[in-house]
Image (tube, rainbow, N blue to C red):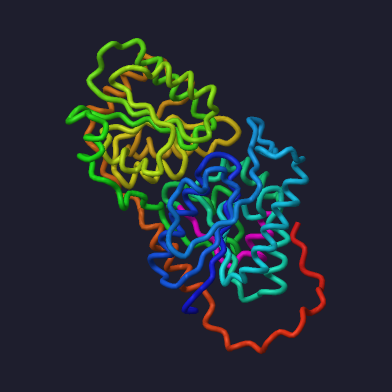
């Protein structure tokens, strides 16, 4: 392995915080396990600057996209068409790869990028930098099997997995959800897959006593309600506040975290509803895990990162999965409930009486004993270390650029 490897990370970030948070967790582990590594993260997240960066990591902010409720993409802020925004992002990604000269490219989830924006960079690296290792990171569940297979075929993903990517890092456990079988991955693609396990996310937190002192709650039970980025978290927090409004005195304190992507209008209405002494209302914190560690119960959606945090902390949890556009969260919540690790309520089951009964039932349960593989971050960095190329012999000075030649096309 080179002494000073360069690692390029791509995180398209069109909805929520999941891709960014996962990429930053991996980058932090790389910084710890691979001293001297230089990392460059390409992200479209509007809140990327709110997080602390590990040493050796810089970022390139791509023009932001957002995914509408119907699953279609559009520019989030700028008065540009989708085509204009994608063209701009495509050029920025390619230029970053040319200038940074990575030894390894790690792509989060989207093998071809949003609407194929990563394809020119993959072509360039395959043709002009064949020593660069191309690695795809894949979360435990993409979507329902039929929908994933259909989407992969439409975007040419099977060919990318077989012909372009050198390795596939699976951030899950096949005994819980077998992506190879469910998504009908070919033998060639399956042979590249490394089963990493889930990503442990409970390191470097504050002590629960310090968090409780900050909230002023002493030994009172704490229920933390979080909706990730918050872009579609209004329904859960509104349902929770409706439950509180029908109960004058409850034996627990509630911390509600709306996420930075919830609209100001919706957040303001929820904050007015939350104006009571047994509720702490918070827009966003990069230290959410510390509050979750101090909690007696976590109520959340079923996004990958929050779920990993719940499992890492071995917390009682009620998962209320997103059920629109993708079935990923519903499947994850269902599988974990079947294993007895969490409880599940669907959005249409958030009636005040039912939610309160579920909270009381959950608080009375012992904390779960999680025996899943949570060593994903260590496995990822070990795999990356072994994949990085050996030091290359010192190259002769380049006098001029060679003429461009055709590169392979991957539809």
Specify the quadrant of the image occupied by residue 380: bottom left
Residue 31, x across and y down, in percent: 42, 65
Magenta-drawn stretch contains 169 = yes
Q: Left or right? Give the position of 363 relative to 149.
A: left
Q: In front here: 161 or 127?
A: 127
Kindly tell me whether residue 334 is visible in this rendering: no
- Compared with 284, 24 (above or below) is below
Q: Left or right? Give the position of 409 relative to 305.
A: right
Residue 159, x across and y down, in percent: 69, 59
Magenta-drawn stretch contains 193 = no
Residue at figure coordinates x 43%, y 32% from the top left: 283
- Compared with 40, 34 (above or below) is below
Q: In front here: 336 or 278?
A: 278
Q: Left or right? Give the position of 360 relative to 271.
A: left
Kindly tell me whether residue 136 is visible in this rendering: yes
Residue at figure coordinates x 34%, y 29% from the top left: 255
Q: Which portion, as a residue range, is magenta?
A: 157-171
- Compared with 91, 393 (above or below) is below
Residue at figure coordinates x 33%, y 33% from the top left: 298
Residue 56, x across and y down, in percent: 47, 65
- Compared with 345, 16 (above or below) is below
Specify the quadrant of the image occupied by residue 80: top right
Residue at figure coordinates x 25%, y 23% from the top left: 252
């Amino acid at each position: 392995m080179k002494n000073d490897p360069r690692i390029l990370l791509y995180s398209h970030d069109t909805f929520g915080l999941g891709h960014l948070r996962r990429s930053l967790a991996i980058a932090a582990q790389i910084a710890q396990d691979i001293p001297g590594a230089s990392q460059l993260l390409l992200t479209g997240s509007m809140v990327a600057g709110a997080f602390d960066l590990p040493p050796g990591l810089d970022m390139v902010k791509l023009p932001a996209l957002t995914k509408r409720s119907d699953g279609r993409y559009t520019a989030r802020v700028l008065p540009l068409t989708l085509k204009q925004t994608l063209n701009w992002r495509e050029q920025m990604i390619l230029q970053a790869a040319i200038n940074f000269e990575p030894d390894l490219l790690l792509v989060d989830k989207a093998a071809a990028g949003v609407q194929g924006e990563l394809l020119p960079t993959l072509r360039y690296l395959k043709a002009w930098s064949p020593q660069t290792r191309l690695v795809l990171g894949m979360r435990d569940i993409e979507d329902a099997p039929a929908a994933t297979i259909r989407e992969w075929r439409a975007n040419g993903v099977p060919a990318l997995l077989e012909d372009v990517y050198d390795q596939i890092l699976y951030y899950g456990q096949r005994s819980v959800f077998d992506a190879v079988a469910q998504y009908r991955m070919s033998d060639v693609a399956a042979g590249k897959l490394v089963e990493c396990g889930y990503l442990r996310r409970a390191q470097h937190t504050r002590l629960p006593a310090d968090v409780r002192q900050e909230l002023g709650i002493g030994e009172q039970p704490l229920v933390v309600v979080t909706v990730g980025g918050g872009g579609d978290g209004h329904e859960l927090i509104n349902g929770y506040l409706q439950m509180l409004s029908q109960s004058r005195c409850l034996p627990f304190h509630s911390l509600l975290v709306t996420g930075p992507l919830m609209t100001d209008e919706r957040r303001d209405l929820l904050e007015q509803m939350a104006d009571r002494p047994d509720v702490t209302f918070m827009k966003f914190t990069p230290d959410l895990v510390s509050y979750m560690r101090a909690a007696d119960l976590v109520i959340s959606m079923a996004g990958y990162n929050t779920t990993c945090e719940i499992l890492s902390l071995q917390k009682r949890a009620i998962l209320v999965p997103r059920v629109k556009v993708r079935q990923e969260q519903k499947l994850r919540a269902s599988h974990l409930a079947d294993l007895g690790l969490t409880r599940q309520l669907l959005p249409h089951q958030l009636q005040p009486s039912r939610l309160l009964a579920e909270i009381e039932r959950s608080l009375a349960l012992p904390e779960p004993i999680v025996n899943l593989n949570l060593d994903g971050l260590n496995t990822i960095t070990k795999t990356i270390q072994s994949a990085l190329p050996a030091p290359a012999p010192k190259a002769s000075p380049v006098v001029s650029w060679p003429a461009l030649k055709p590169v392979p096309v991957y539809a």
